[in-house]
Amino acid sequence: MSKAIGNIETFYETLGVPFDATFEQIKQAYIDGIFSYSQHGIYSENQEWNMFILEFTRAYTVLSDKNLREKYNRTLDFDIVILDKNIDKTELAELSNQYKKFSSNNYDKILYNYNKFKLEMNETLWLLKTSSIFFFFNILFSFSSIYTIMLLTEQSLKFKYIYKHLYTHSIFLSFTMVITNFILFRLFWQGPILKKKRMMK
């Protein structure tokens, strides 16, 4: 968690608890803070007391709620470096709030795009891996099949025409077999498995 420079407190600092504080610690810090200010004789008619109660309660409300706390924590991942020591604290606070709001609004979108990209990359790698393995054995099988048929028909007068045809077009026939096998592989094996993987996710 990063902190902006310029006396802009996070809710954790407002309550005086660490970033990984438990619900019980947050609750106790809130009770202790209210009690401490009450003991010093600061009452509701005092403006400073009202501002303290407002910020203190706001901090407690957010940090004591799991969903609100998770959402708030996302806005804390930022750094603001202040070079001008005389900068107006009001302007600094406004700048910080705008930055956090922008960061919060875009966090879910960034996370969604990242997960989508990760899923697409995993699918692409899986397709490349299975396709490469299949292609290797497919080429080996296709050329071996054509060559085996040629050997079987070479000595036979009955299949002399087939042998000549295979001999002339062996490479073309082999590649045709490779492409046909790959299309069938893609449609009837890769396609259904990829669809099943997407449904599971």
Image (cartoon, grey):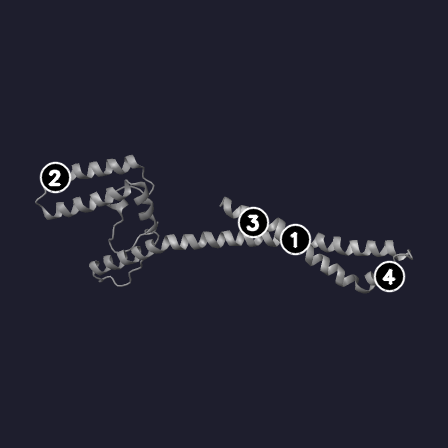
Q: Is residue 166 left or right of residue 11?
A: right
Helix or strand or loop: what does disc 3 sit on? helix
How far apart in space, not on screen, are marks 2 and 1 (Cα)?
82 Å
Q: Which residue is mark 1?
A: 184
In the picture, the disc for residue 161 is 4
How far apart in space, not on screen, are marks 1 and 4 (Cα)?
29 Å
Q: How many numbered marks does the figure carry?
A: 4
How far apart in space, not on screen, are marks 1 and 3 (Cα)?
15 Å
How far apart in space, not on screen, are marks 4 and 2 (Cα)?
110 Å
Residue at x 10%, y 43% (from the top left corner): 44
Q: Position of residue 167 (x, y in %)?
A: 83, 62
Kindly indicate the quadrant of the structure image that contains residue 64.
top left
Q: Which residue is mark 2?
A: 40
Dot 2 or dot 3: first in sequence order is 2
Q: Is residue 69 left or right of residue 53?
A: right
Binning the other alpha carbons within 10 Å of mark 4 as few (below 14), some (14 to 19) or many (20 upward) gives few
Marks 1 and 3: CB-CB under 8 Å?
no
Binning the other alpha carbons within 10 Å of mark 3 as few (below 14), some (14 to 19) or many (20 upward) gives some
Residue at x 51%, y 48% (from the top left corner): 198
Kindly indicate the quadrant of the structure image that contains residue 56.
top left
Q: Is residue 104 left or right of residue 149?
A: left
Helix or strand or loop: what does disc 2 sit on? loop
How far apart in space, not on screen, are marks 4 and 3 (Cα)?
44 Å
Nearer to us of marks 2 and 3 is 3
Q: Position of residue 115 (x, y in %)?
A: 46, 51
Q: Amino acid at mark 1?
A: Leu
**Which residue appears farthest toward the left when viewing the image?**
45
Q: Amino acid at mark 4?
A: Tyr
